[in-house]
Image (cartoon, rainbow, N blue to C red):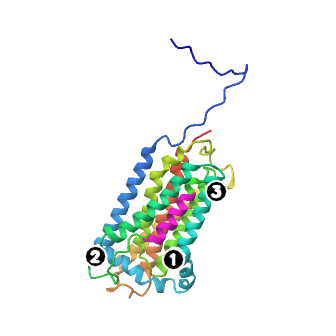
Amino acid sequence: MSSPRPQPRVRPGAAPSPRPRRAGRAPVLFWLGAALCAAAFACTYYVFVRTTTGQFVDESAWAEAGAGWPLGRGLSLEFLALLPDISAVLAALVLLWVALARRRWQAAAAAAGVVAASAATSWLLKNLLLERPDRGVSMLAHNSLPSGHTTIAAAAALAVFLVATPKWRPFAAAAGGLYAVLGGSATLINGWHRPADVVAAFLVAGFWTLLAGPLVLRSGGDWNVFGGYGGSWPSSRWWPRLCWLLALLGTAAAAALYWSIARAGAAPTPGTGLLPLFFWAGMALITATGMLLSALLTWLFSLQAGRP
């Protein structure tokens, strides 16, 4: 019979120190979120690429970009040309610092995998797997869904979010969401992509981020312990509230614009309407999707992080 394990000595009158709650206890929530991203991607592709009405809506937003944002093309074009480089450099610097200085090798490797897998998935889907049927609407016959530029921007922002400590994740989600929305909007303003291409790119990056979530949360150490909102400005509740607010405003604006277009009737040819309503509806849809993803990721990761 084996001897009993020696018990740690506790000073008289002193309570034993509590262990932090283990992070990532329910990976099924992450898997469910990834499945929802995949389903939303499939719906986005079917509605805006496979149907005539969806193609008309998306093509109209693309054709109205010049009238909807006439002053921003020069500036946004310069930003767009540098977007992949900026995103890659920022993500690489943060991941190297996390891996070398903080020694969070597993988290940094998972975040780098999110960027690589997102970029590869978007390239395969756009160039090899998905087709754009000819409905007599599109001015460009080739498939452009999802947007590669937006995928890199969103995946880089989410990689930073993954390796950030729980205290910094609320701020990282809000800042990263705004950065991704800005990059995706620039592709529409410059006529590089349609709104659905940007929305699909967000969903690709979100899919891989959710699959990597349990690996990051269980990467060891006490750095994944979340003390709650409000302890410092990066963990303020106003960051997720900002994400929710922008998501709701974007959703309401997109719904109102599409409803007004359906009520008044659209121009027979994309881009010939009196007002660029399709363009602004597409911008609202991009904002709603990007900020909703940021809000949901903030909620899920704060819920699953360890507790002191």
155 is within the stretch colored magenta = yes
Give neighbour class at mark 2: few <14, some 14-19, many 20+ (Cα, 10 Å): some
Give neighbour class at mark 3: few <14, some 14-19, many 20+ (Cα, 10 Å): some
Residue 268 x %, y %: 31, 86
**Number of the front mark, 1 or 3:** 3
Q: Is residue 236 visible?
A: no
Give the residue type that dot 1 points to.
Ala
Residue 236 x %, y %: 64, 54
Q: Which residues are magenta?
A: 147-160
Give neighbour class at mark 1: few <14, some 14-19, many 20+ (Cα, 10 Å): many
**Number of the front mark, 3 or 2:** 3
Secondary structure found at label 3: helix
Which numbered disc, 1 or 3, marks the residue that appears first in the sequence?
3
**Number of the front mark, 2 or 1:** 1
267 is within the stretch colored magenta = no
Q: Which residue is mark 3?
A: 97
Q: Which residue is mark 1?
A: 186
Q: Nearer the viewer, residue 39 or 68?
A: 39
Give the residue type that dot 2 points to.
Thr
Along the horizontal axis of the image, is 218 left or right of 32? right
Q: Which residue is mark 2?
A: 52
Secondary structure found at label 1: helix
| Vertical relation: 23 (above or below) 155 | above
Q: Are marks 3 and 2 in contact (CB under 8 Å)?
A: no
Find the distance from the CA under tag 2 to the CA under tag 1: 25 Å
